[in-house]
Structures are given as structure tokens and as C-alpha cells.
Image: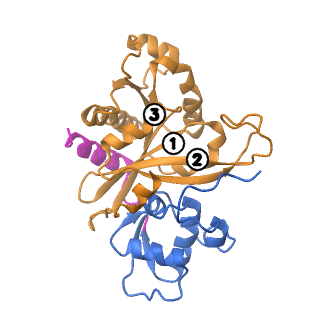
């Protein structure tokens, strides 16, 4: 798969683009980050990998293997040219505390984050939400609807995720472009309202 | 313990060889979404294979740092070191991600919102 991505010709930005904005799409393993980025991106999503030194001793699925000091973290991202002067990049990355360095790089200059959640594993969203709060990056939560996954009233999900009253909560289908666009719009409306409030 | 062999076919040398042992770029101005533009009039002779590949990619048009890393299949940290050198040597120039002094965040958010709504 990697080589298929590599053999693709690069798709260049229009010469008129002046500003690049960045939004993070985060969540736990297999929550649909890459799918979400893929349904919105105008380019085939690209992947970059960083080799990270482990802060902690434990590595997913590698517990018990001694001497593992580095791990490779993959970051999938996509691009949307929104106007002749503005391009938006969506970065999807695993939300684990031990990837803090990657996170600092990703969150620097980011407008905000969309946290994808799965109703079957809501508890797994806490770590990523905690990271965002620590880094001071505002976020909205989008429950990615998986076929066969239980649905709950918003109030119950809010309570389970311990969301602040102002944090937007939406349901989306990460496979669907329109649904994913709506989720992103909800996030940006929230960010916009926050910024307006700060400047009153 | 030996880390698993890289799956990429281009990664025949280790990242620190590509960067001549350096882990930090000569300048700290690269964000993942910094836009990079190549200058067409600079000679490519004498550049390392990785820098030459980077230049050949960028000569086609503007790309972000993250896209360059993705296309070249190199870690972002390595690409930032190469970019620093190529900016120093006059091969490339960059456009800061968000020129915050000029464009307030509120305006960027509004433009993002307009752009997204137009896609529905």
C-alpha cells in the first residue's frame, strides 16, 4: 500500500494559495480517522511516519518484549482547497499520551480538533480528550456511526464522555462525504463562536 | 532488539545518514502545513539524492511540508532538516502556515466555514 501511495503523482496546490489551515481528526485506534480524512480529502490521503522514542515502557501489543525503545507512529492526512487562497489540511493521528512530541507538532497552529468516538468504546476517548484539554486545543465530538453499534440519546453520550455543556456533539458517518463535511462545519462554527466571544 | 525492517523501498539508508547526523533543521520555521515553493533557477548538481528528489518533487508546484514527507516517504523530522538546508542554499522558499499578524483567526475560521459550506 505504501508503494501505491508513493507512485502517485503529486497533486500540487494552486499558485494562488496563500494560507494553509490545519484541523486535527483524532480518536482511539480504529475509530475511523483515516476513513473520515479520506472521504473529505481532494487528494488520496497521504501517510507520514515518525520514529518516536518511547516515553513509557509499554507498547501496544508488544508488552513483554524487552528493549523496545522506539516505535513508529503513522499520521494520515488529507487536503481540501477551500478557496483560491486557502487550503485546509486534516491530520489524523492516534491519541495516546506517549506520542506527545508528535502531538505538539500537530497541534501547533491548529484551529481545533474533531474527536471521533465509537458508542461501543466511549471510554477509550478519554485519553485523547484529556490530551487536547492539556494542550488547550478546542474540540467537538463526532460519534462515528458503525453499522450495528448501539445508539444512545445525546444526553447519555454527553454524560458518558463528561462533556462540557458548550462542547458540540454530533453523529456522523465517516464514510460519507456530506456527513463528514457537516461534522467539520459543526466544529468550525463552534470555533468561530468561541473566537467571537473572546473578542467581545 | 532490531527494529522491524522498513516497508518502504526507498528507505535504504537510515534517517540520520540522510540528514548527515542532524536531528534538527537549521531554522525552526517549518510547520506541517508550511507551504514550500522551489526556485527553478537553482542548479541541482551537488545535492544529495534525497535533496535532489525533494527538489524534483517541489519544482512541480507548491506543497506543504507534510505532503513532501508523505510523497518522499521520509519522516517529517528528516524532511525539515533537508528543507532547512535547501532554504539556506536558496533552492526553496516557504510561506508561513498562517500569517497570524496579518490574518486574524476569526477571518480564517470564517473562510474555512464558507469553503466547507460551499461543498455541501
In percent of width and height, residue A95 lies at 56, 36
Secondary structure beneath dot 2 equals strand
| Residue at mark 3 to residue at mark 1: CA–CA distance | 15 Å
Q: Which residue is mark 3?
A: A139
Question: Which residues lie in the magenta part?
Answer: B95-120
Mark 3, Cα crowd under 10 Å, few <14 / some 14-19 / many 20+, is many
State the residue position of label 2. A73
Disc 3, disc 2: CB below 8 Å?
Answer: no
Residue A60, horizontal then vertical, whole percent: 66, 35
Mark 3 or mark 2: name the one nearer the start of the chain: 2
Which residue shows up at 66% across the image and 34% down it?
A: A61
Check residue A93 in the rendering and tell me which mark sits there, or answer none. 1
Residue furthest right as drawn: A66
Q: Would you call the spot at circle 2 few (<14 residues within 10 Å), some (14-19), or many (20 or more)?
A: some
Q: Chain of mark 2?
A: A
Is label 1 in contact with label 2 (beta carbons under 8 Å)?
A: yes
Residue B116 colored in magenta in the image: yes
* Colour treatment of the image: by chain
Name the element at disc 3: strand
Magenta-colored stretch includes residue B77: no
For label 1, the crowd category at 10 Å Cα-Cα, with few meaning under 14, some 14 to 19 and many 20 or more, is many
Amino acid at each position: 500500500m505504501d508503494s501505491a501511495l508513493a507512485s502517485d503523482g503529486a497533486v500540487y496546490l494552486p499558485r494562488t494559495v496563500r494560507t494553509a489551515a490545519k484541523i486535527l481528526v483524532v480518536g482511539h485506534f480504529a475509530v475511523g480517522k483515516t476513513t473520515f480524512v479520506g472521504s473529505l480529502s481532494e487528494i488520496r490521503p497521504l501517510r507520514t511516519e515518525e520514529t518516536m522514542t518511547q516515553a513509557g515502557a509499554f507498547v501496544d501489543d508488544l508488552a513483554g518484549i524487552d528493549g523496545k525503545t522506539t516505535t513508529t507512529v503513522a499520521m494520515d492526512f488529507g487536503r481540501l482547497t477551500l478557496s483560491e487562497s486557502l487550503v485546509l489540511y486534516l491530520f489524523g493521528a492516534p491519541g495516546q499520551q506517549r506520542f506527545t512530541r508528535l502531538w505538539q507538532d500537530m497541534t501547533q497552529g491548529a484551529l481545533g480538533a474533531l474527536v471521533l468516538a465509537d458508542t461501543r468504546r466511549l471510554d477509550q476517548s478519554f485519553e485523547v480528550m484529556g490530551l487536547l484539554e492539556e494542550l488547550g486545543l478546542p474540540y467537538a465530538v463526532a460519534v462515528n456511526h458503525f453499522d450495528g453499534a448501539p445508539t444512545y440519546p445525546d444526553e447519555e453520550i454527553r454524560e458518558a464522555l463528561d462533556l462540557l455543556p458548550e462542547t458540540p456533539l454530533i453523529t456522523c458517518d465517516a464514510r460519507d462525504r456530506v456527513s463528514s463535511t457537516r461534522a467539520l462545519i459543526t466544529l468550525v462554527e463552534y470555533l468561530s463562536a468561541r473566537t467571537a466571544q473572546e473578542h467581545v | 532488539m532490531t527494529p522491524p525492517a522498513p516497508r518502504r523501498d526507498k528507505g535504504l539508508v537510515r534517517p540520520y545518514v540522510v540528514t548527515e547526523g542532524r536531528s534538527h533543521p537549521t531554522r525552526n520555521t517549518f510547520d506541517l502545513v508550511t507551504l514550500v515553493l522551489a526556485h527553478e533557477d537553482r542548479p541541482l548538481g551537488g545535492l544529495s539524492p534525497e535533496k535532489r528528489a525533494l527538489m524534483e518533487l517541489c519544482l512541480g508546484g507548491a506543497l506543504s511540508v507534510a505532503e513532501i514527507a508523505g510523497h518522499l516517504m521520509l519522516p517529517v523530522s528528516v524532511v525539515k532538516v533537508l528543507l532547512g538546508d535547501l532554504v539556506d542554499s536558496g533552492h526553496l522558499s516557504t510561506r508561513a502556515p498562517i500569517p497570524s499578524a496579518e490574518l486574524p483567526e476569526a477571518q480564517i475560521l470564517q473562510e474555512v466555514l464558507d469553503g466547507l459550506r460551499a461543498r455541501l
